[in-house]
Amino acid sequence: MSLRILTTFALVAFVAVNAKPCGGFGCPFRRPPPPPPCGIPPFLAELPADAQAKITEIWKDYQTGAKCYNEQGLTREILDALPKELQKSLHKRPPPPPFLAGLPKETLAKFDAIFQDKSIPHQKKIEQIDALAEKTLSGENLKKFQEFKAKKEQEKKEYEEKKSNLSENAKEVDAKIEELRKQKFELIESLDEKTREELFDLWETRPGPHGPPRH
Protein backbone atom coordinates (compact mmCIF):
# COMPACT_ATOMS: atom_id res chain seq x y z
CA MET A 1 0.00 0.00 0.00
CA SER A 2 1.31 3.43 -0.88
CA LEU A 3 2.30 5.47 2.15
CA ARG A 4 1.82 8.54 -0.01
CA ILE A 5 -1.85 7.61 -0.38
CA LEU A 6 -2.21 7.32 3.37
CA THR A 7 -0.56 10.66 3.83
CA THR A 8 -3.00 12.10 1.30
CA PHE A 9 -5.74 11.54 3.87
CA ALA A 10 -4.20 14.14 6.12
CA LEU A 11 -4.23 16.57 3.20
CA VAL A 12 -7.78 15.64 2.19
CA ALA A 13 -9.10 16.06 5.72
CA PHE A 14 -7.14 19.26 6.16
CA VAL A 15 -8.59 20.75 2.98
CA ALA A 16 -12.11 19.71 3.95
CA VAL A 17 -12.12 21.42 7.34
CA ASN A 18 -9.56 24.14 6.76
CA ALA A 19 -9.74 25.36 3.18
CA LYS A 20 -6.85 27.79 3.14
CA PRO A 21 -5.07 28.75 -0.08
CA CYS A 22 -1.46 27.82 -0.57
CA GLY A 23 -1.96 24.49 1.14
CA GLY A 24 -0.33 22.37 -1.51
CA PHE A 25 3.05 21.78 -3.07
CA GLY A 26 5.17 24.79 -3.84
CA CYS A 27 3.62 26.97 -1.16
CA PRO A 28 6.29 29.46 -0.04
CA PHE A 29 4.79 29.96 3.42
CA ARG A 30 4.38 26.42 4.72
CA ARG A 31 5.28 25.71 8.32
CA PRO A 32 7.95 23.06 8.91
CA PRO A 33 6.56 19.51 9.20
CA PRO A 34 5.82 18.17 12.68
CA PRO A 35 8.17 15.61 14.25
CA PRO A 36 7.43 11.95 13.48
CA PRO A 37 4.96 10.21 15.81
CA CYS A 38 6.28 8.09 18.63
CA GLY A 39 6.60 4.40 17.89
CA ILE A 40 8.27 2.02 15.46
CA PRO A 41 8.52 3.63 12.00
CA PRO A 42 5.86 2.36 9.55
CA PHE A 43 8.57 1.49 7.02
CA LEU A 44 10.37 -0.90 9.40
CA ALA A 45 9.81 -3.91 7.12
CA GLU A 46 11.73 -2.16 4.34
CA LEU A 47 14.91 -1.84 6.41
CA PRO A 48 17.79 -4.34 6.61
CA ALA A 49 17.26 -7.10 9.16
CA ASP A 50 19.87 -5.77 11.59
CA ALA A 51 18.33 -2.29 11.53
CA GLN A 52 14.88 -3.79 12.12
CA ALA A 53 16.15 -5.70 15.14
CA LYS A 54 17.87 -2.65 16.65
CA ILE A 55 14.86 -0.37 16.19
CA THR A 56 12.48 -2.99 17.59
CA GLU A 57 14.73 -3.28 20.64
CA ILE A 58 14.72 0.51 21.11
CA TRP A 59 10.92 0.68 21.23
CA LYS A 60 10.16 -2.57 23.08
CA ASP A 61 9.50 -0.88 26.44
CA TYR A 62 7.85 2.27 25.12
CA GLN A 63 4.44 3.09 26.60
CA THR A 64 1.89 4.79 24.36
CA GLY A 65 1.44 8.44 25.29
CA ALA A 66 4.84 8.83 26.93
CA LYS A 67 7.57 11.16 25.67
CA CYS A 68 9.87 9.50 23.17
CA TYR A 69 12.75 11.90 22.56
CA ASN A 70 15.36 9.31 23.51
CA GLU A 71 13.83 6.57 21.37
CA GLN A 72 13.50 8.91 18.41
CA GLY A 73 17.11 10.00 18.76
CA LEU A 74 18.41 6.44 18.85
CA THR A 75 16.20 5.51 15.89
CA ARG A 76 17.51 8.47 13.93
CA GLU A 77 21.10 7.35 14.54
CA ILE A 78 20.31 3.97 12.99
CA LEU A 79 18.50 5.50 10.02
CA ASP A 80 21.33 7.96 9.41
CA ALA A 81 23.76 5.04 9.18
CA LEU A 82 21.80 3.39 6.35
CA PRO A 83 23.05 3.57 2.75
CA LYS A 84 22.26 6.93 1.18
CA GLU A 85 20.08 5.45 -1.55
CA LEU A 86 17.92 3.66 1.00
CA GLN A 87 17.61 6.83 3.06
CA LYS A 88 16.55 8.72 -0.04
CA SER A 89 13.82 6.21 -0.87
CA LEU A 90 12.46 6.39 2.68
CA HIS A 91 12.39 10.19 2.67
CA LYS A 92 10.25 10.16 -0.45
CA ARG A 93 7.47 8.41 1.42
CA PRO A 94 6.26 10.31 4.46
CA PRO A 95 4.53 8.30 7.20
CA PRO A 96 0.75 8.06 7.46
CA PRO A 97 -1.05 10.41 9.85
CA PRO A 98 -0.56 9.42 13.52
CA PHE A 99 -4.09 8.06 13.96
CA LEU A 100 -3.46 5.46 11.23
CA ALA A 101 -0.06 4.39 12.52
CA GLY A 102 0.20 0.80 13.70
CA LEU A 103 -3.18 -0.33 12.38
CA PRO A 104 -3.64 -3.79 10.81
CA LYS A 105 -3.23 -3.99 7.05
CA GLU A 106 -6.87 -5.01 6.72
CA THR A 107 -7.99 -1.76 8.37
CA LEU A 108 -5.62 0.38 6.32
CA ALA A 109 -6.95 -1.31 3.18
CA LYS A 110 -10.45 -0.02 3.97
CA PHE A 111 -9.20 3.56 4.14
CA ASP A 112 -7.10 3.01 1.03
CA ALA A 113 -10.13 1.80 -0.93
CA ILE A 114 -11.89 5.10 -0.29
CA PHE A 115 -8.81 7.16 -1.15
CA GLN A 116 -8.36 5.45 -4.50
CA ASP A 117 -12.00 5.44 -5.61
CA LYS A 118 -12.10 8.34 -8.05
CA SER A 119 -15.86 7.96 -8.47
CA ILE A 120 -16.48 9.28 -4.94
CA PRO A 121 -16.84 13.09 -4.79
CA HIS A 122 -14.38 14.90 -2.55
CA GLN A 123 -16.81 15.81 0.22
CA LYS A 124 -18.33 12.33 0.17
CA LYS A 125 -14.87 10.86 0.71
CA ILE A 126 -14.45 12.97 3.82
CA GLU A 127 -17.78 11.76 5.17
CA GLN A 128 -16.93 8.11 4.46
CA ILE A 129 -13.48 8.42 6.01
CA ASP A 130 -15.00 10.04 9.09
CA ALA A 131 -17.57 7.27 9.45
CA LEU A 132 -14.96 4.56 8.90
CA ALA A 133 -12.62 6.09 11.47
CA GLU A 134 -15.35 6.29 14.10
CA LYS A 135 -16.34 2.69 13.37
CA THR A 136 -12.94 1.00 13.14
CA LEU A 137 -10.53 3.03 15.27
CA SER A 138 -10.24 2.55 19.00
CA GLY A 139 -8.02 3.48 21.91
CA GLU A 140 -5.14 5.81 21.14
CA ASN A 141 -5.84 5.82 17.39
CA LEU A 142 -9.43 6.98 17.89
CA LYS A 143 -8.30 9.58 20.41
CA LYS A 144 -5.74 10.97 17.95
CA PHE A 145 -8.33 11.05 15.17
CA GLN A 146 -10.81 12.96 17.33
CA GLU A 147 -8.08 15.37 18.43
CA PHE A 148 -7.14 15.89 14.78
CA LYS A 149 -10.74 16.67 13.85
CA ALA A 150 -11.26 19.02 16.78
CA LYS A 151 -8.04 20.88 16.05
CA LYS A 152 -8.85 21.34 12.37
CA GLU A 153 -12.42 22.41 13.10
CA GLN A 154 -11.15 25.04 15.53
CA GLU A 155 -8.62 26.24 12.97
CA LYS A 156 -11.37 26.44 10.36
CA LYS A 157 -13.54 28.52 12.67
CA GLU A 158 -10.71 30.95 13.37
CA TYR A 159 -9.85 31.12 9.68
CA GLU A 160 -13.42 31.85 8.63
CA GLU A 161 -13.70 34.61 11.23
CA LYS A 162 -10.54 36.23 9.93
CA LYS A 163 -11.69 35.78 6.34
CA SER A 164 -15.00 37.52 7.06
CA ASN A 165 -13.09 40.64 8.11
CA LEU A 166 -11.23 41.01 4.81
CA SER A 167 -11.79 44.05 2.63
CA GLU A 168 -13.92 43.56 -0.47
CA ASN A 169 -10.85 43.63 -2.72
CA ALA A 170 -9.07 41.04 -0.59
CA LYS A 171 -12.18 38.83 -0.55
CA GLU A 172 -12.35 38.92 -4.34
CA VAL A 173 -8.71 37.92 -4.74
CA ASP A 174 -9.05 35.25 -2.06
CA ALA A 175 -12.00 33.70 -3.91
CA LYS A 176 -10.00 33.54 -7.14
CA ILE A 177 -7.00 31.96 -5.41
CA GLU A 178 -9.26 29.46 -3.67
CA GLU A 179 -10.75 28.40 -7.00
CA LEU A 180 -7.26 27.90 -8.46
CA ARG A 181 -6.25 25.87 -5.41
CA LYS A 182 -9.32 23.69 -5.82
CA GLN A 183 -8.55 23.10 -9.49
CA LYS A 184 -4.95 22.20 -8.65
CA PHE A 185 -6.03 19.70 -6.00
CA GLU A 186 -8.59 18.08 -8.30
CA LEU A 187 -6.03 17.88 -11.10
CA ILE A 188 -3.48 16.12 -8.88
CA GLU A 189 -6.15 13.70 -7.65
CA SER A 190 -7.03 12.79 -11.24
CA LEU A 191 -3.47 11.80 -12.18
CA ASP A 192 -2.25 8.23 -12.39
CA GLU A 193 0.26 7.08 -9.77
CA LYS A 194 3.29 7.26 -12.09
CA THR A 195 2.60 10.85 -13.12
CA ARG A 196 2.01 11.90 -9.51
CA GLU A 197 5.30 10.30 -8.48
CA GLU A 198 7.15 12.21 -11.21
CA LEU A 199 5.66 15.50 -10.08
CA PHE A 200 6.20 14.80 -6.38
CA ASP A 201 9.85 14.02 -7.10
CA LEU A 202 10.17 17.30 -8.99
CA TRP A 203 8.42 19.43 -6.36
CA GLU A 204 10.46 17.94 -3.53
CA THR A 205 13.60 19.35 -5.16
CA ARG A 206 12.14 22.77 -5.94
CA PRO A 207 14.35 25.53 -4.50
CA GLY A 208 12.76 27.45 -1.64
CA PRO A 209 11.88 31.14 -1.78
CA HIS A 210 14.45 33.76 -0.89
CA GLY A 211 14.17 35.50 2.43
CA PRO A 212 12.57 34.41 5.71
CA PRO A 213 9.22 32.57 5.62
CA ARG A 214 6.03 34.40 6.49
CA HIS A 215 3.46 32.78 8.78
Image (cartoon, rainbow, N blue to C red):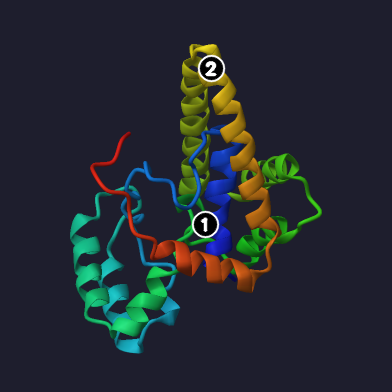
Looking at the rendering, in which quadrant would you find the N terminus? bottom right
Q: Residues within 10 Å of mark 1 (few under 14, many from 20)?
A: some
For this rendering, which residue is in front, 36 or 117?
117
Evaluate if marks 2 and 1 touch, with contact meaning CB atoms under 8 Å apart: no
For this rendering, which residue is in front, 43 or 124?
124
* Amino acid of disc 1: Thr
Which residue is identified by label 1? 7
Q: Position of residue 136 (x, y in %)?
A: 64, 50
How many numbered marks are there? 2
Image position of 157 with respect to 71: above or below: above
Image position of 194 with respect to 178: above or below: below
Image position of 208 with respect to 85: above or below: above
* Residue beneath the point at 22% across and 80% down: 81
Q: CA distance from mark 2 to mark 1?
A: 35 Å
* Residue beneath the point at 71% across and 39% down: 123
Q: Position of residue 58 (x, y in %)?
A: 25, 70
Image position of 104 with respect to 178: above or below: below
Looking at the rendering, in which quadrant would you find the C terminus? top left
Element type at marker 1? helix
The image's mark for residue 169 is: 2
Mark 2 or mark 1, whichever is nearer to me? 2
Q: Position of residue 5 (x, y in %)?
A: 58, 61
Q: Position of residue 19 (x, y in %)?
A: 56, 33
For this rendering, which residue is in front, 67 or 22?
22
Element type at marker 2? helix
Q: Residues within 10 Å of mark 2 (few under 14, many from 20)?
A: few
Left or right of residue 155, residue 187 in this image: right
* Residue beneath the point at 29% across and 87% down: 50
For this rendering, which residue is in front, 162 or 18?
162
The image's mark for residue 17 is: none
* Residue beneath the point at 27% across and 64% down: 61
